[in-house]
Amino acid sequence: MPIPSELFETITGRLDPARGPAVVDDAIGLWHAMMNKFRPLLGPLSTELLLVRALELSEAQFPWLGCAHERNVALPPFDTLRSRLTQRTPQEIVDANRAVCTLFISQLVELIGPRLTERFLRSAFPDNQQKGNQLGESA
């Protein structure tokens, strides 16, 4: 993957199968954060199409995730995606979202380049150390 692995772990580390059914909300939250961050840069339709394409490409590995063709799958509040996720085990949810996230990020890198992609991802998903520094700086 063209972004640092620690950044990918920061993004997907929020998806913990030990959280049980709550991991569905975590996954949906990840996609809200992605869409909210890249929508102003790429536009709503382009951002949605990137997610649809990532879902399509993931269907080979996760056939149960075959919802890319369904209407509004890539639009918040992600009800269609949520309905697919709630039918799976927490580990399946984590694995599928990691795969979709990898594909989504790869498309971003191809479209806007690795440096800009990384900059936007870091601002959308600051790691714990950055959060601490931001809190310390504002005090």
Image (cartoon, grey):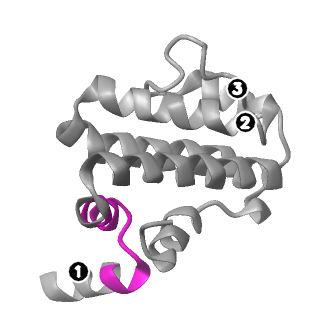
Picture quarter containing residue 94? bottom right
**Residue 68 - label:** none
The amino acid pointed to by label 3 is Ser
Q: Which residue is mark 1?
A: 134
Q: Are marks 1 and 3 in contact (CB under 8 Å)?
A: no
Residue 122 among magenta residues:
yes
Residue 49 among magenta residues:
no
- Image side of residue 26 versus residue 118, left or right: right
| Sooner in the amino-acid sequence: mark 1 or mark 2 | 2
Determine whether the residue tagged by mark 3 lies in a helix, strand or loop: helix
Q: Nearer the viewer, mark 1 or mark 2?
A: 2
Q: Which residue is mark 3?
A: 83
Q: Which residue is mark 2?
A: 85
Q: Residues within 10 Å of mark 1 (few under 14, many from 20)?
A: few
What residue sits 25% from the left and 81% below the top? 135
Q: CA distance from mark 2 to mark 3?
A: 6 Å
Query: What secondary structure characterizes most of the magenta part?
Result: helix
Picture quarter containing residue 82? top right
